[in-house]
Image (cartoon, helix red, strand yellow):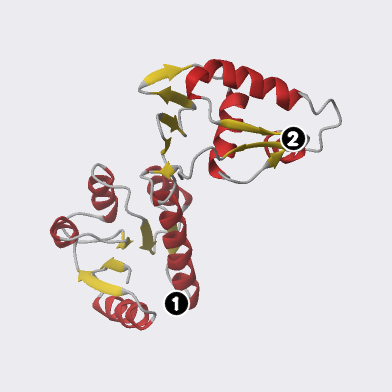
């Protein structure tokens, strides 16, 4: 169950938010001012924060700024301040959404669900892929064999990544061309062979790529799956 911190000083709106959001299946914790919000935030973890701006003690902008120094937890700002300047300020503080009052509760619930889905996908984005002595830094397009950096071109890296993602499956030249070149390639399909040849040369003894004559390529020399972290 996702847990949401609702920060709202208007008790009638707070109660309304609590009832609707809890009924939608979320866990709810309440705070009525900026200081209480930061205290609750420091005591426990939340999956999303609904944050009013015009709060006693510390306003919502201040709360968001403090939270962003520590975490990328999703924040949706709820406020009567509907002018462009305040909206831009909230977005500059990396709020994930900015909703002005009055608002529709069904729309708010859908926005909460959408933000939580995006957050969940980002948390699941893999950073590295490991296979035997091979490590791929998926963000930096870097490859290491036994800890030693191997210089690959971006296209060589992408081919290696695709083969590891689809380990055990034969990828034809057309598969690779359409996936990596992003369009129907009308030139010589053997361009893939050239990249594979260069890739094997650079990997040296750590080459795990198997040629399936007349079909394509795969990584399947041993029954071992790549580990994505």
- Residue 208: x and y in percent read 53, 30
Q: Secondary structure at mark 2?
A: helix
Of 122 and 24, which appears nearest the observer?
A: 122
Q: Left or right of 3: which side holds 178? A: right
* Location of residue 39 by image quarter: bottom left
- Residue 47: x and y in percent read 31, 61
Residue drawn at x 15%, y 55% is 42
- Residue 51: x and y in percent read 31, 61
Q: Secondary structure at mark 1?
A: helix
Of 6 and 200, which appears nearest the observer?
A: 200
Along the polypeptide, which appears first: circle 2 or circle 1?
1
Residue drawn at x 37%, y 59% is 77
* Location of residue 41 by image quarter: bottom left
Of 184 and 131, which appears nearest the observer?
A: 131
Q: Left or right of 222: which side holds 16? A: left
- Residue 193: x and y in percent read 72, 24
Residue labelled with disc 2: 173
Height in image: 62 above or below 19? above
Is the residue marked by circle 1 packed among few (<14), some (14-19), or many (20+) residues within 10 Å?
Answer: few
Marks 2 and 1, Cα distance to the nearest angstrom?
Answer: 51 Å
Height in image: 186 above or below 1? above
Pointer 2 with pointer 1, Cβ within 8 A: no
Residue labelled with disc 1: 105
Is the residue marked by circle 2 packed among few (<14), some (14-19), or many (20+) residues within 10 Å?
Answer: some
Q: How many marks?
A: 2
Residue drawn at x 46%, y 25% is 143
């Amino acid at each position: 169950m996702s847990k949401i911190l609702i920060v709202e000083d208007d008790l009638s709106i707070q109660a309304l938010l609590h009832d609707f959001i809890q009924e939608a299946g979320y866990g709810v914790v309440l705070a009525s001012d900026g200081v209480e919000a930061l205290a609750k935030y420091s005591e426990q973890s939340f999956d999303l924060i609904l944050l009013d701006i015009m709060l006693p003690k510390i306003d919502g902008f201040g709360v968001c700024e403090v939270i962003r120094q520590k975490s990328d937890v999703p924040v949706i700002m709820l406020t009567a301040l509907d002018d462009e300047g305040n909206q831009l300020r909230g977005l500059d503080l990396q709020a994930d959404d900015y909703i002005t009052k009055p608002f529709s509760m069904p729309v708010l619930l859908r926005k909460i669900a959408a933000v939580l889905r995006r957050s969940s996908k980002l948390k699941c984005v893999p950073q590295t892929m490991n296979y035997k002595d091979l490590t791929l830094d998926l963000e930096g397009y870097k490859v290491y064999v036994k800890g030693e950096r191997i210089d690959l071109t971006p296209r060589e890296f992408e081919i290696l990544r695709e083969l590891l993602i689809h380990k055990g499956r034969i990828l034809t030249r057309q598969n690779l061309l359409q996936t990596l070149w992003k369009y129907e390639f009308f030139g010589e399909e053997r361009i893939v062979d050239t990249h594979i040849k260069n890739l094997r040369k650079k990997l040296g003894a750590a080459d795990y790529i198997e040629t399936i004559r007349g079909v394509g390529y795969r990584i399947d020399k041993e029954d071992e799956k790549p580990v994505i972290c």
